[in-house]
């Protein structure tokens, strides 16, 4: 598998003048987010990226991401463990860190990297895309995600990696050629959804980048990196031969586990790739 990515470092002034994160310095990886990062409920039965990352880097993994999560259920409600109401409290409980007392807990701050990859559920169906959250807007959601840095910083964290949203308009659910599926069976204009999602993701990613750039100078000794997941997934979609190595024809429009429903139906026809054929699919 060939990997290329873009990483923008939004580091604070004291960190620019001093030393940044050094090779071999990080010993702990703490992950927050949704199904893209959840190591327990892995949708395709594969191995989640934090397991690979921690293994290759030889660091200890502390996984708190959960499938279905949003940033806050007080902003975009979903009956899943959100970042602020579930994942962060679980982290504080497990480590003894405290943003109120500024207690760092059991993890050495200089040796720990904190990552966040959210947004898919916040902007998607039954959330911002379909107007299910009243007066909530994109700025509210993106500010919530950036606040994750501030809260962890107050508990002693210093090294952050913020992962932006992928091109969701390329996924099965939001592509112009989408069909009734597990996540949305009702009538919809798939072209409208795809265009709207493309604009929302682009706007949201720009907002978080600007917010993080504005925040960085107020956090002495912090190191903030912005991983361009959007660029990575766009490249994987456009050049699958550089990333996918399965035994089936390369596929960037279908999914390993695909279920097609009748409109408003409760039953479906499902196909599932197995074995090495799974490595031919982007989704």
Image (cartoon, rainbow, N blue to C red):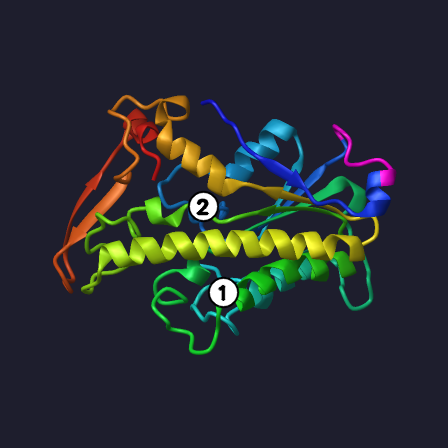
The answer to whether one can see residue 263 in this image is yes
Answer whether residue 49 is magenta in the image.
Answer: no
Residue 35 rendering spot, x and y as whole percentages: 45, 50
Residue 111 left/right relative to 277 = right
Between 229 and 283, the residue placed more toward the observer is 229
What element does badge 2 sit on?
A: loop
Classify mark 1: helix, strand or loop: helix
Check if mark 2's residue and mark 1's residue have beta carbons within 8 Å: no
Residue located at (35% from left, 67% from top): 126
Closer to us: 241 or 77: 241
Quadrant of the rendered image containing residue 159:
top right
Sort mark 1 into few (<14), some (14-19) or many (20+) by Cα contacts within 10 Å: some
Q: Quadrant of residue 256?
A: top left
Q: Which residues are magenta?
A: 17-24
Specify which label sits upstream in the sequence, 2 or 1: 1
Q: Say whether residue 203 is left or right of residue 195.
A: right
Of tags 2 and 1, which is closer to the observer? 1
Residue at image x 47%, y 69%? 76
Locate the N terminus by quadrant: top left
Instruction: Residue 154: give its label.
Output: none
Q: Which residue is mark 1?
A: 138
Please state the horizontal and vertical placement of residue 163, each as a whole percent of the image. 56, 46
Q: Residue at x 43, y 57 (%)?
A: 200
Nearer to the camera, 239 or 162: 239
Disc marking residue 166: 2
Residue at the farthest bottom position: 134
Q: Is residue 115 above or below residue 73?
A: above
Q: Position of 154 compared to 278: left or right? A: right
Q: Residue at x 33, y 46 (%)?
A: 171
Disc 2 crowd rating (10 Å Cα; few below 14, some 14-19, many 20+) is many
Q: Give the image location of residue 113, x and y in percent.
A: 69, 43
Predominant SS along the magenta part: loop
């Amino acid at each position: 598998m060939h990997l290329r990515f873009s990483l923008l470092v939004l580091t604070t002034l004291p960190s620019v003048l001093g030393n940044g994160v050094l090779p071999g310095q990080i010993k702990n990886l703490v992950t927050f987010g949704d199904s893209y990062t959840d190591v327990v409920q892995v949708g395709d039965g594969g191995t989640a990226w934090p397991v690979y990352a921690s293994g290759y880097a030889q660091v200890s993994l502390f996984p708190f991401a959960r499938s279905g999560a949003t940033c806050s259920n007080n902003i975009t409600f979903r009956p899943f463990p959100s970042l602020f109401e579930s994942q962060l409290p679980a982290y504080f409980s497990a480590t003894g860190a405290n943003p109120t007392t500024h207690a760092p807990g059991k993890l050495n701050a200089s040796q720990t990297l904190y990552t966040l990859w959210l947004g898919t559920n916040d902007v998607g169906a039954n959330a911002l895309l379909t107007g299910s959250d009243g007066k909530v807007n994109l700025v509210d959601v993106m500010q919530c995600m950036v606040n994750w840095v501030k809260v962890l910083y107050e508990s002693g964290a210093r090294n952050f990696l913020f992962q932006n949203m992928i091109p969701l308009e390329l996924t099965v659910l939001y592509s112009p050629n989408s069909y009734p599926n597990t996540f949305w069976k009702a009538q919809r204009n798939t072209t409208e959804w795809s265009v709207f999602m493309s604009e929302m993701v682009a706007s949201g990613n720009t907002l978080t980048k600007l917010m993080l750039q504005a925040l960085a100078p107020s956090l002495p000794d912090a190191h903030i990196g912005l991983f361009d997941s959007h660029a990575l997934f766009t490249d994987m979609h456009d050049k699958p031969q550089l990333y996918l190595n399965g035994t089936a024809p390369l596929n960037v429009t279908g999914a390993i586990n695909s279920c097609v429903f009748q409109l408003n139906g409760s039953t479906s026809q499902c196909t599932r790739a197995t074995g090495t054929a799974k490595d031919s699919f982007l989704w």
